[in-house]
Every structure is written in structure tokens, then in C-alpha cells.
Image (tube, coloured by chain):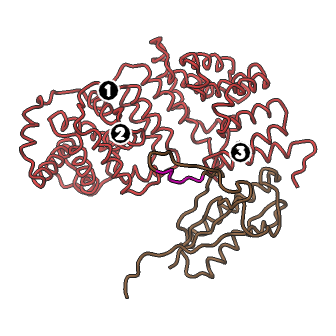
Amino acid sequence: MPKYLLLKHYRGGPEPYHPFPPMDQWAPQDVEAHMAFLRHVSELLKENGEYVDAQALTPAQTWVRYGGPDAAPVTTDGPLPETSDLVAGWYMIDVDSHERALELAAYVSSEPGPGGEPLYEWIDVREVMSGPPSHD
Amino acid sequence: VIDEPARQLDEGALRALVPRVLAGLVRRGEDFDAAEDALQEALLEALRVWPKHPPRDPRAWLTTVATRRLVDARRSEAARHRREEATHAEPRPATTEEGDDTLFLLFCCCHPDLAPASQVALTLRAVGGLTTREIADAFYVPEATMAQRISRAKGTLRGRRLNQPGDLAVVLRVLYLVYTAGHAGRTDLAGEAIRLARQLTLATEEPEARGLLALMLLNHARLPARLDPDGRIITLDQQDRGLWDTHEIAEGVRVLQTALAEQHPGRYQIEAAIAALHDDAASAKETDWPQILAWYDDLIALTDDPVRNDPAAVLGRAVAVGHVLGAAAGLRETDRLREVLGDRHRWHAVRAHLHELAGDLPAAGAAYAEAARRATNVAERDHLVRQAARARAREPRSNSR
């Protein structure tokens, strides 16, 4: 069974279908509904036997590279820190097919936003490469 | 030997034997590293075998099995001469008190040359009697990673003299780290830390050891009220105080009183005293903030330049200042910490709380949102987002939709 990452972004990706303000500016009951939905997604994936992992990342990003011999590592905030892609977290799922991965990603994207309306958030779906084949 | 039917294995009793057996092996002249590995194998064997065949003398059983493993290991290494040197060079085991064993092993595991993560892992295995698997689960890392961390830690200790009295302050810090590391994982690290601290208080008269035990008990007592069934954080002022564990509070207060009676207050005793004052209030409104502030004054007086060396204490004190002298005074206290803590979520969260106390909801909402952006824990992040949304919803002219 193939594994997929369903990546959520703080920013970046296609033009938002339905722009929305940051969550800290939503009505409290809308925040609760959103968080309850995300808990429900994790539970659903576990019940289905499709859950592998779910993690959230902090928005602080540091790019780093080797600085050369006897030099400290070189760091930067990135080329365009205000506009570049920034991953917020992921679900890793183990599913029957690519279609199932897209179906689940679309379900995640239906998460409720302000006023209980779906967020229509773009989800980045990436297949995880599997281990070496067991036969020729 | 009586052949009893399978019965519930008392894992607590089994694990309590681990430091005693290990100390016995090391005092007998066995290498700490090898003895600890051998005992871990004996422990796994015991977990497997004892439920059906409980031994008559559990301690002797563990010692025998571990010794057999040590002999096997040595044979396979073909290094028998080293053992002979070791057994002849080291003094015979003295009959010792149980408490001495615990203290001796804690000093080994909390050796100052080890990194904190290694001290914690080694302490949990060698003194706590946890399996590598359980420790790995507690820290959400693969078992092989934790096994390697423990093995490298013991490699660092190889050749060090382990019979010197160690640094009790390091031991206390490691136990507190164990306590704060875990309320979430499958392994109950908080409960384990309390058990170890209790053992430590039997081994040393140092009041700070009792202060640490009291601090853990007085905080742990509030654990049942700290999260709701959906995992949402409930702040101290909103908690259902009926859920607090009154037995744990009573024990914590008792332990703290015997420590304070010695008139050598240290940071754990002081923090425990602050926790006790919170536990003592029948409602958030009845919290004795002036007395809490007095203890914070004592706490920051322990450190030179507390803003740099103990900013967490200064931040805690700022909250108390806010409740005693007013929110504006509390905020002024936090200003001193901007340079040191300004990029930490807790600094912004405290300021948000003080703004809210002052009735400045727009500033509170903005500060909660800043705190949420800096949180490094999902439950705290979600909590701070909720607080921001709640503060903004209470603004007179809300623009939340």
C-alpha cells in the first residue's frame, strides 16, 4: 500500500480559493469547530487503519548550509521570507490508491472556517517512495 | 517451589528492586556498563517468566540471572582476566542500606559529563527499572535510538571513578526534567519521577530533595483538572478544583513543612511553597497573591542577575506583581525580560494575561496571537489561539467575521 504525505501550509501554494483571516481572528465557536474537525480527522484515519503519523511544525524557519572548512554553518531566513512556501504540518497516510489519498486530502480541505464555511484550503499531496522491491 | 497459577505481576515491586540489585553488582566490582546491560536482560526475563513462575526471593533471582548474563558476556568476550583483576581490586560489598544504593546509582546516572537527555534515559533505566522500550515510548523515539543513547552514555562513563559522592543538584535537576518531560506519553514519567524523588528523600537529609518531592506532588495533584476530555488546556483559574487530588496536596504540604523547618530554603522548596498556595485556594479569587509574591521575591534573591540567570522566575513574579500591584506594574516587570525572553511564547502569553487583567482586550488578543505563533506544543498553541479569539470576540467593536 502506498504512503502519502498530506501537507498543510502556513503560506505558499496556489491562489487561495476562498481567502480567510488568521484563526486568532475567528469567532471562538468557529475556532472550536475547526479544532474538533482536525481531531475527528485523526480519529477517522486511525479507525480506517490508514493513519501513520500526524505532526505540526512551528512557523519559525531557518535555512542552513555548510560554511566551508573551519567556518561556522551559514544561516538565512530564506530568499523571500514573507512569500515563500512554509509547511505547517502533515498527515502521513497509508492507503490503497492515489485516488484515496486525494479523497482524504479533499476531506481535510473541507475543514470548517469562519462562519462554519469550508476553508477550501489547498493540500499538497506527495507520495512517499517505498523501500527496495522484494522481487525482480 | 510452590507452583502457583499465573497471577498479576507486581511491576512496581520488581522495578524497585532494580537499583538495589544493580548497586550490589557494581559494589561487588562489576563494571557499571556491563552490569546495567545484564540487569536489563534479567528484567526482561523476569517480566516474561514471573507471572507464571514467581520466584521465592525476587532480589536473589535477579542477581543470579544478571550474574549469569555477565559471565556469559565475559566468556564471549574472552576477557576473563579483566574480571579477575576487577574482583580482586575492588573491595568486597558492604552491607548497605537501600537508600545508599539509590543515591549511589543516581550519582552514577546523573554524572556531570553526561548530556541531560542521557542522564534522564540512564536514570530511568538503571534506577527506575524501566525497559528501553518504555523509555523510548515516553520520548516518542524509536527503541533502537533510545538503546543507542543509553549505550553511548555508559560509554562516556567507562573508566570514570563512580565511587565519589556526586552532585546532588544535578540529580535533582534530572529528576525534575523527568517530571516535566511527561504527562502525555504511554509511560507515566511524572509518576516515575515522584517515585524516584521519594526514594531520594529516604537517602538524603538535604531539604531540597524534599522540596523537589513536594513541588512534584503539589503540581501533580492538579493534573486531573488540567486538560478536558478533548485534550484542551484548562488554565489554573478555570480549573474545577474539586478534581484536584487532596491526598497528594496533603502529602506535598507535609513534606514541604518538614523541609522548610530546616531553614535552608532553596529553589525547589520555594517553588513548592508557591504551588502549595495555589493548591490551598478554594477558588481562583481567593488565591493569596501577596504571599506568592513574597515567595517569588525570595526565589529571585537566590540568583545574581535573575533577569539573565533565572528569567522564568522573574516572569512568574511578574504575574504575581500584576495581581498584587496591578496589571501595569506586572507589565513593567515583563519589559525587563524583553531582550532575554522576547521570542518565547510564554513571555507573550504572560503579557496577554496581564493586558486582559487590565481590561485592554485588543492588546491581549494581539499578544495571545503572538504567543500562539511562537508555541512549540500543539496543545499550547491551540489554547493560545482560542485565548486570542476569545479576547478579540469580547472587544466592543469586533471585526472577527
Q: Which mark is residue B166?
A: 1
Residue B123 shows which numbered tag?
2
Relative image position of residue B359 (x, y in whole percent): 85, 32
Query: Given this view, does label 1 or label 2 mark the residue nearer the observer?
Result: 1
Instruction: Name the residue at the front extreme.
Output: A69
| Residue B73 percent across, percent down from the top left | 15, 52
Q: Nearer the viewer, mark 3 or mark 1?
A: 1
Dot 3 surroundings within 10 Å: few (below 14), some, or many (20 or more)?
Answer: many
- Camera sees residue B229: no
Q: Is residue A128 visible?
A: yes
State the residue at coordinates (16%, 39%).
B30
From the viewer's perspective, is B300 left or right of A36?
Answer: left
Residue beneath label 3, please?
Answer: B384
Q: Colour of chain B?
A: red
From this view, report whether residue A106 is shown above or below residue B163. Answer: below
Q: Earlier in the sequence, mark 1 or mark 2?
A: 2
Left or right, B345 with reference to B16:
right
Residue at the extreme top: B263
Numbered disc 2: secondary structure = helix
- The chain that hosts pointer 1 is B
Give how far apart the Cα atoms at labels 3 and 1 are: 41 Å
The stretch drawn in magenta includes residue A125: no
Q: Amino acid at mark 1?
A: Gly
- Tell me which segment is drawn in magenta: A63-68
Q: Farthest bottom residue?
A: A136
Chain of the residue under label 2: B
Distance of mark 1 from mark 2, alpha carbons? 14 Å
Give the numbered dot on residue A28: none
Residue B270 falls in which quadrant of the image? top right
**Chain A, which colour?**
brown
Query: Quick one: SS at disc 1?
Result: loop
